[in-house]
Amino acid sequence: MLRKSKGQELFDQIIYHLDLAEADYFGLQFMDSEQVSHWLDMAKLIKKQIRDGPPYRLFFRVKFYSSEPNNLHEEFTRYLFVLQLRQDILSGK
């Protein structure tokens, strides 16, 4: 990634790499120096949002849960939802 990359550019590369069709449910999360989690704003420069780095440490996470899991068309999307739910339950979130 270039130093002046926006969040959307990084997110698009991740979505392309994962070959994920239903990207609207996901986002990138980072922790600030006080260990408070924040969602990466896709319209802003990455370096303006994350003070610690580079290198940056980001987490690909479910940002919006569907109230109707049947609305998820792709099996891979459902799989990522299950992984996230499992991690949240095990970590007590």
Image: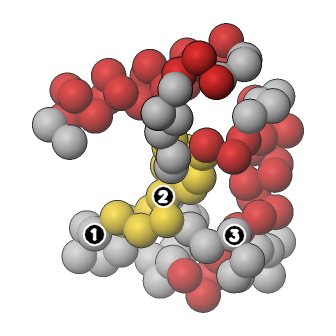
Q: Position of residue 69 (x, y in %)?
A: 53, 22
Q: Look at the picture and state if 53 lies above or below 29.
A: below
| Numbered badge on residue 36 | 1
- The tag earlier along the polypeptide, 1 or 3, is 1
Type of amino acid at the residue the image marks with label 3: Met
Horizontal relation, residue 89 to residue 10: left or right: left
The residue that appears at 52% across and 26% down in the rendered structure is 68
Instruction: Give the Cα separation between the discs numbered 2 and 1.
Output: 10 Å
The residue that appears at 73% across and 54% down in the rendered structure is 11
- Residue at the limit of the structure toward the bottom, as seen here: 48
| In front: label 1 or label 3 | 3
Q: Quick one: label 2, few (<14), some, or many (20+) residues within 10 Å? A: some
Q: Secondary structure at mark 2?
A: strand
Q: Does residue 3 show up?
A: no
Task: Assess whether mark 3 and mark 1 are in contact (beta carbons under 8 angstroms).
Answer: no
The residue that appears at 52% across and 35% down in the rendered structure is 66
| Numbered badge on residue 42 | 3
Q: Quick one: label 1, few (<14), some, or many (20+) residues within 10 Å? A: few
Type of amino acid at the residue the image marks with label 2: Gln
Q: Which residue is mark 2?
A: 29
Q: Quadrant of residue 17?
A: top right
Q: Quadrant of residue 16?
A: top right
Type of amino acid at the residue the image marks with label 1: Val
Q: Quadrant of the C terminus?
A: top left
Q: Does residue 87 show up?
A: yes
